[in-house]
Amino acid sequence: MKFYRILVNVIIVYCALYSTIWLHELGHALFYYGYGCKSELFQLNVPFYFAAASPGKIEQTCYNLLSSYQHVWASMGGIIVNLILVLGMYFILLKNKDYPKIALFANFFILSNLIEAASYLTLNNIRPMGDITAVAQYFPLLRIPLGLIGAGIIFIIIRFIQAIQRPFRIGMIIFCIATVVCMFGLRFLFAA
C-alpha cells in the first residue's frame, strides 16, 4: 500500500513537471504562431525525458524576418506563461487545500513553474542559453532587471517552501535542487 501511494505521488509530481515544460513551450509557440512563423500551434516537441524540448517546427524564413523585439518576446514567451500559470494555480490551490492529490499537483506545479522561470532569469542570465539568448543578443541591458526578477522569484520559492507543512519541506527542497540541476544541465548539454 505504501509503495502504491509513493508511486501515485511520483506520477503526480512528474505530471506537474511535464505540464510545466509543455506549457512553457506553448508560450513560445503562441508568439511564433501570432507572428505567422508557426502553422500548427500545438505541435510541440516535449519528450517524456524533457531534453531538447522546443516549441516545434518554426518556419525559418519568417523567423529570420522577425524584428529584435519579436525575437525577445517569442523567447520570453515561455517564462511569461510560467509566471501567469503560477498565479492561476495558486488560486486553484487555495480552493482545493482539502483535496490532497490536487494540492500535491498544485504545489509541485507552482514550484516547477517558479523554478523554470527563476533558472532562466538567473543561471541562464549569467551564461546566456535558451530563452535568454535573444535578450543577450538584442537587448543585453535587459538582463539586469530580468536577473533581479529572477532573484525575486528565488525569494518567492524559499517563502513558498517555508509555508509548506514541515514533513514535505525536505522533499520539496530535494525536488528544487534536482530540477534546477537537470534543467540547467540539459540546457547546457543541448545548447546549440
Image (cartoon, helix red, strand yellow):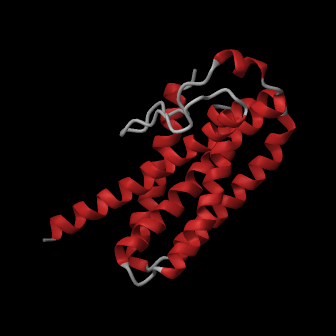
Q: Is residue 83 visible?
A: yes
Quarter-of-image position of residue 27 = top right
Pinpoint residue 91: horizontal percent, then vertical percent. 58, 74
| Apparent side of residue 141 relative to residue 83 in the rendered image (left or right) | right
Q: Quadrant of the C terminus?
A: top right
* Residue 122 shows in this picture: no
Q: Is residue 3 above or below residue 19?
A: below
**Residue located 45% across and 42% down the image:** 182
Left or right, 65 with reference to 46? right
Instruction: Name the outermost residue toward the bottom.
Output: 98
Q: How many discs appear?
A: 0
Give coordinates of residue 97: x percent, y percent.
45, 81
Query: In the image, residue 166 lies at what x, y percent?
Result: 43, 79
Q: In the figure, residue 25 lies in which quadrant?
A: top right
- In the displayed structure, 33 sits above or below 162; it is above
Q: Position of residue 18 (x, y in %)?
A: 43, 48
Residue in the picture at 65% in, 34% down: 33
Residue drawn at (46%, 49%) of the image = 179
Residue closest to the far left: 1
In depth, the one of 41 and 177 nearer the eye is 41
- Figure quadrant of the N terminus: bottom left
- Closest to the observer: 63 or 135? 63
Relative to 95, say whether 68 is above or below. above
Residue at 82%, 28% in the rendered image: 68
Q: Is residue 39 above or below residue 177?
A: above
Between 12 and 178, the one lying in front of the other is 12
> Splitting the image into 4 quarters, where does residue 152 fall?
bottom right
